[in-house]
């Protein structure tokens, strides 16, 4: 009777039961699904980080141009979302225009050869920016505020050079 009981319980078996196979396959499926989901999240966050880096570089490029222009400016005027910078030593007029959403444009017109060059700065893609600027006796302050992060405003300070 003991020999028959052992065979019935499967003590000497060489195969897996259906339940064991289902458990192993479901565990493997969960591990594989989790790995694929993790790779997708990593890839998406790398894309978002690359876009954010590009926009930060654009803001830095815009700030550098603005600071350089205000440094040698003979006159700076602000009207709505537009800043006009006159450079009498170089006979240039530079106009910065914020579209209020994602871009700021820069137009440089030279009086001598009447050439106009345009440049645009994409300061935000996924979020809209509002920009404000004000002028004091020492220079210009331009503030970029993302509408989805109003507490993290970016202030660009452009100081004027020594007057002659």
Image (cartoon, rainbow, N blue to C red):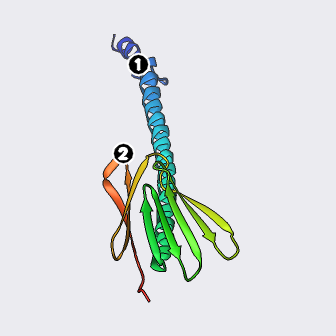
Q: CA distance from mark 1 to mark 2?
A: 64 Å
Residue 83 % position (x, y)? 47, 63
Residue 67 visible here: no
Front in this rendered view, residue 45 or 143: 143
The residue at the point 45 percent across, 79 percent down is 71
Q: Determine whether, in the image, residue 138 is placed left or right of residue 97.
A: left
What label sits on residue 10 in the rendered view?
Answer: 1
Residue 131 visible here: yes
Residue 16 % position (x, y)? 46, 23
The residue at the point 43 percent across, 47 percent down is 128
Front in this rendered view, residue 158 or 15: 158
- Kindly indicate whether the residue at mark 2 contacts the one at mark 1 (C-beta within 8 angstroms): no
Dot 2: element: loop
Residue 72 % position (x, y)? 49, 80
Front in this rendered view, residue 58 or 143: 143
- Look at the image and tell me in which quarter the N terminus lies: top left
Residue count near mark 1 (Cα–Cα under 10 Å), binned few <14, some 14–19, many ≥20: few
Tag 2 residue: 148
The residue at the point 70 percent across, 74 percent down is 113
Dot 1: element: loop
- Look at the image and tell me in which quarter the C terminus lies: bottom left
91 relative to 154, above or below: below
Q: Determine whether, in the image, residue 120 is placed left or right of residue 15.
A: right
Front in this rendered view, residue 40 or 113: 113
Residue count near mark 2 (Cα–Cα under 10 Å), binned few <14, some 14–19, many ≥20: few
Instruction: Looking at this view, name the residue that lies furthest to the left.
Output: 151
Task: Pick whichever of labels 1 and 2 is earlier in the sequence.
Answer: 1
The quarter holding residue 90 reads bottom right
């Amino acid at each position: 009777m003991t020999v028959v009981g052992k065979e019935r319980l499967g003590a000497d078996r060489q195969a897996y039961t259906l339940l064991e196979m289902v458990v192993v396959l479901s565990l493997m499926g969960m591990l594989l699904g989790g790995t694929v989901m993790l790779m997708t999240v990593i890839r998406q966050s790398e894309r978002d980080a690359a876009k954010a880096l590009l926009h930060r570089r654009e803001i830095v490029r815009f700030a550098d141009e603005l600071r350089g222009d205000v440094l040698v400016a003979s006159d700076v005027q602000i009207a709505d979302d537009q800043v006009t910078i006159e450079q009498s030593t170089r006979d240039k007029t530079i106009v910065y225009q914020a579209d209020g959403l994602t871009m700021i444009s820069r137009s440089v017109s030279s009086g001598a050869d009447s050439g106009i060059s345009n440049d645009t700065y994409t300061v935000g893609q996924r979020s809209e920016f509002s920009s404000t600027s004000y002028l004091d006796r020492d220079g210009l302050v331009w503030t970029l505020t993302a509408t989805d992060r109003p507490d993290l405003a970016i202030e660009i300070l452009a100081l004027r050079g020594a007057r002659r």
